[in-house]
Amino acid sequence: MSVARPRLSAFPKCYLEEISNDGGRTVFDWIEEAKQLDADGLEMYEGFLPGWPDGVPDDASLDRVRDAIAEAGFLMPMLCCSPDFTQPDPDDRRRAVERQRCMIRATRRLAGADFEDGGRPVCRVLSGQRRPEVGREQGLDWVTECIEACLPTARAEGVTLGLENHYKDGFWRHPEFAQKADVFLDLLDRVPEREYFGVQFDPSNALVAGDDPVDLLERVAERVVSMHASDRYLVPGASLEDLRQADGTLGYSPDLKHGVTGQGLNDYDALFTRLAAVGYAGWISIEDGMNGLGEMAESLAFLRRMVAKHWGG
């Protein structure tokens, strides 16, 4: 009897601003370029879609992206969205909820009706920005209320919401409200939904938060619904303690570089041992390419070997 095991997808962090800001490269250029990668799927970002940042994409535009992904031989397992649920103005929060609902519908449309073989598609959800004027309890109340408001749409569309232990959306002013593990875990506990809500786990973001990735995974493994698998390494002479800020986080220091997955600070043997132990069979996405697609290809090859090692085959 074969064991269900994770599939691999790719996300072009290297092209994030170029595609999102109409910098001469389109999402269709990325899809074409991705054909050279050994991936099963292509993860999308809301900024890659028409209408961003203020509007939402129409169905015809979504269908063109979906068809291009399918024609290139990929599935679309996750749409990365960055809702800001810590805005003090309740009308702004309501608008953020409505936009996230639209992105949940977009996730289903991009994944297509035949995605069931790839599991349930994931729409990433974040907490919002860590605004200095928003206290912890107030922020947790707001974010919980907003996520709960999105769940009926997720259930109706057959889409899972994945809460990421994130650092900071590239277009935000402040880092993630729930960046640190203690706040992230408190927020996760406040949303008991298990079928249509879970964790989008990123070990590198745990490092940036000043937390231990393996320890965090131990605490959330049974709720993981998707995973990013990038890696970070320190420049010669630097140490994590040197980079630690007053709040314990590291930030995106120039001394903490992107690199080939498996060659940096993350212990992927330990991470995958834990995921395999709980029967994880969702998607693992390589989020990188900062030093060229050659490194992304190396990362995917590493992940293929690791999946075979820990899940068999």
Image (cartoon, helix red, strand yellow):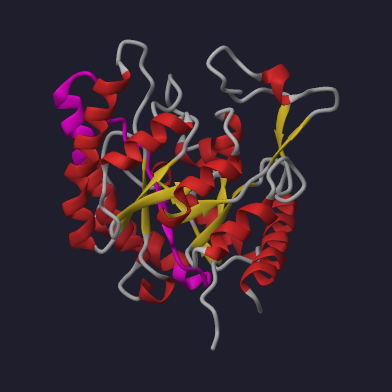
- Which quadrant, please, contains the N terminus? bottom right
Q: Is residue 73 left or right of residue 126?
A: right
Query: Measured from the top left, where is residue 9 in percent x and y?
Result: 55, 60
Image quadrant where residue 232 sits: top right
53 versus 269 height, above or below: above
In the image, residue 86 lies in the stretch drawn in magenta: yes
Q: Residue furthest right?
A: 236
Camera sees residue 13: no
Question: Start and end of the magenta stretch?
Answer: 70-98
Query: Measured from the top left, where is residue 152 in percent x and y?
Result: 16, 53
273 or 78, which lies in front?
Answer: 273
Image quadrant where residue 308 sits: bottom right
Q: How many marks?
A: 0
289 versus 185 height, above or below: below
- Which quadrant, please, contains the C terminus? bottom right
138 or 123, which lies in front?
Answer: 138
127 or 91, which lies in front?
Answer: 127
Residue appearing at x 62%, y 60% in the figure = 273
Residue appearing at x 54%, y 67% in the figure = 6
Residue appearing at x 39%, y 70% in the figure = 119
Q: Is residue 137 left or right of residue 153?
A: right
Residue appearing at x 41%, y 49% in the figure = 199
Query: Measured from the top left, where is residue 91 in percent x and y?
Result: 14, 25
Camera sees residue 118: yes
Q: Is residue 85 left or right of residue 3?
A: left
298 or 184, which lies in front?
Answer: 184
